[in-house]
Amino acid sequence: MQKKDYLYSFLSGLFLAFHFITWFESLKYTSIASSVVLVTMSPIFSMIGESIFFKKRYPLLSILGSLVSIIGGILIGLGDFRISGKALLGDLLALLGALMVTVYWLFGQKVRTRLTLLPYTLLVYGSSTIILVIYSLSFHYSFTQYEKTDWIVFIALAVIPNILGHTLFNWAIKYTNATTISMVLLGEPIGASILAALIYKEAPTLIQIIGGLIILLGLYVFQRYQIVQNN
């Protein structure tokens, strides 16, 4: 491993920690729907970042596909989407979370060309953990005084979206790019709507169904014409 591999991996973990901080803090001020929709705006930042740092160019239809998916995501959260009062702070934090996760992916895209998955994730998750511990200590957050159900949620969050979810994306980013990863994450509002229906018996509204179909259409167009461009 080169010195820059350690540096880039640490910076990747740093921005992953900032992503968690800004996104989770946004939930204090704005709705879940608004937060999830805004934090999945990362394809916009990814396209800009890849254009600047990797000199990547996307065909017009691929860009249009990404914009269509973003519109679909906005539609899903439209019923609970608001920009006013304290919600504005939450919305800005969620958007900042989208920027932070984009930088995290861009560093990962750079480092994973040389590092295998295990050392990279060990360095990234390790540095992210240290930063989050320092953050929690700075605000005097407790590490122990939680209910049993809270611990179940903590463990589930660690295992499913982080160890499984983020690790799968970190594996995939060696073979694809940050924008593609970000585009796939636009399916998150769809998954959230399905889980809400299964767990909380919240039937999806017509506009949520339409938004989900629009996201899938946009994802198809983006992937279809990006592959043509790459070939």
Image: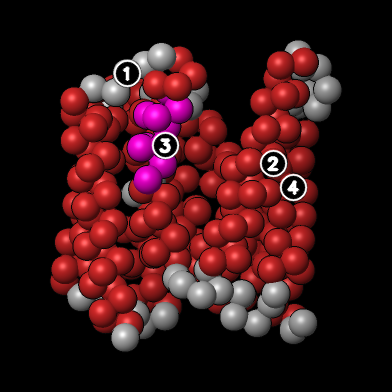
Residue 191 numbered mark, or none: 3
Q: How crowded is mark 1: few (under 14 residues within 10 Å), some or many (20 or more)?
A: few
Pointer 1 or 3: first along the chain: 3
Q: Which numbered disc, 3 or 4, marks the residue closer to the eye?
A: 3
Q: Can you give x and y, in whole percent of width and height, for residue 111 in the image?
A: 62, 75
The CA span between labels 1 and 2 is: 27 Å
Q: How crowded is mark 3: few (under 14 residues within 10 Å), some or many (20 or more)?
A: few
Pointer 1 or 2: first along the chain: 2
Residue 203 numbered mark, or none: 1
- Look at 21% across and 52% down and name the residue there: 217
Pointer 4 or 2: first along the chain: 4
Q: Name the residue under label 2.
A: 159
Q: Relative to 144, does residue 43 appear above or below in the rendering?
A: below
Pointer 1 or 4: first along the chain: 4
Q: Would you say 172 lies left or right of 157 here?
A: left
Determine the residue located farthest toward the front in the rendered image.
198
| Quarter occupied by residue 54 | bottom left
Q: Can you give x and y, in whole percent of width and height, for residue 103 in the image?
A: 50, 61
Regarding residue 17, the answer to whether it shows in the image is no
Residues marked 1 and 4 touching at CB (< 8 Å): no
Local SS, label 4: helix
The residue segment tinted magenta is 187-196
Amino acid on which the number 4 mark rests in the picture: Thr
Q: Name the residue under label 4.
A: 129
Residues marked 2 and 3 touching at CB (< 8 Å): no
The CA span between labels 1 and 3 is: 13 Å
Q: Residues within 10 Å of mark 4 (few under 14, many from 20)?
A: some
Q: Relative to 183, does residue 145 appear above or below in the rendering?
A: above
Pointer 3 or 4: first along the chain: 4
Local SS, label 1: loop
Q: Would you say 67 lies left or right of 102 here?
A: left
